[in-house]
């Protein structure tokens, strides 16, 4: 069954790469039906749910959680589960997962993106000092100028929340 399962996993990747997300979900599900011990099948399906089906964040979380049972402390699954929690407004769970990503991962994209989402999550929790800390880390590590502009904006709003007008103006400039 594992060979057939891996064949379906490859098909899922092909469908995903050609933007046929329904078929990708079907192939990931077939993979899991044939061999439920492949963490990439759960993670792959979870990423499709997260990226392309905005009403399926709970499904994504279930899949990433299952992947983490099979492969504990996996930065990939923790990262996307954290983003899924954030998308559902569960900031505390997002913070927990994204903090773990920072302690486990060497992936620059995961780390930099986690900093930004941690800033957003702490902002939502009204912990503006930690929001500022993580926005600053994201700004210092981000390479994409467009994203940096948004991070400066978000940090400026956090500075404004604590009454730091000088830094608010500097970030908006």
Image (spheres, helix red, strand yellow):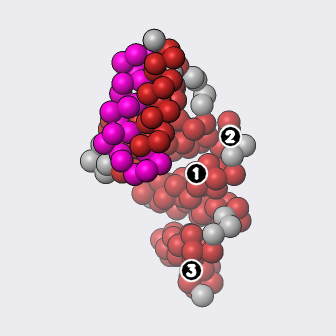
Is residue 133 positioned above or below 58 on the image? below
Disc 1 to disc 2, how far (Cα)? Answer: 10 Å
Q: How many labels does the image show?
A: 3
Quadrant (top left/top right/bottom left/bottom right) for the N terminus: top left
Q: Residue furthest left?
A: 55
User: For this rendering, which residue is in front, 137 or 64?
Assistant: 64
Secondary structure under badge 1? helix
Q: Which of marks 2 and 3 is in front?
A: 2
**Residue 142 part of the magenta segment:** no
Task: Judge from the rendering whether residue 155 lies leftward or rightward of residue 91; answer left or right.
Answer: right
Q: State the extent of the magenta-drawn residues as a range.
A: 16-35
Secondary structure under badge 3? helix
Q: Classify mark 3: residues with Cα within 10 Å, few (<14), some (14-19) or many (20+).
A: many
Q: State which quadrant residue 136 falls in.
A: bottom right
State which tag comes first along the sequence, 1 or 2: 2
State which tag comes first along the sequence, 2 or 3: 2
Q: In the rendering, at what x and y percent does residue 71 appear? A: 57, 23
Judging by the rendered image, the residue that carries numbered circle 3 is 168
Secondary structure under badge 2? loop
Say whether marks 1 and 2 touch (CB < 8 Å): yes
Is residue 147 positioned above or below 21 on the image? below
Judging by the rendered image, the residue that carries numbered circle 2 is 105
Q: Which residue is drawn at 40% across and 51% down?
A: 19
Q: Which residue is drawn at 53% across and 36% down?
A: 78
Judging by the rendered image, the residue that carries numbered circle 1 is 114
Q: In the rendering, at what x and y percent does residue 66 appear? A: 44, 24
Q: In the rendering, at what x and y percent does residue 64 appear? A: 45, 32
């Amino acid at each position: 069954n594992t060979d057939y399962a891996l064949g379906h996993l490859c098909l899922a990747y092909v469908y995903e790469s050609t933007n046929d997300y329904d078929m990708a979900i079907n192939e990931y599900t077939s993979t899991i039906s044939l061999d439920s011990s492949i963490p990439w099948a759960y993670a792959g399906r979870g990423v499709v749910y997260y990226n392309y089906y905005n009403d399926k964040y709970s499904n994504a979380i279930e899949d990433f959680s299952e992947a983490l049972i099979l492969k504990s402390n996996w930065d990939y699954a923790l990262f996307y589960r954290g983003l899924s929690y954030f998308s559902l407004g569960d900031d505390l769970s997002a913070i927990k997962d994204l903090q773990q990503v920072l302690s486990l991962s060497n992936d620059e994209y995961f780390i930099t993106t986690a900093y930004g989402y941690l800033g957003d999550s702490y902002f939502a929790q009204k912990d503006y000092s930690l929001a500022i800390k993580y926005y600053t880390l994201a700004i210092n590590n981000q390479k994409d100028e467009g994203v940096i502009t948004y991070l400066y904006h978000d940090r400026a709003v956090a500075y404004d929340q604590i009454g730091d007008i000088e830094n608010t103006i500097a970030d908006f400039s």
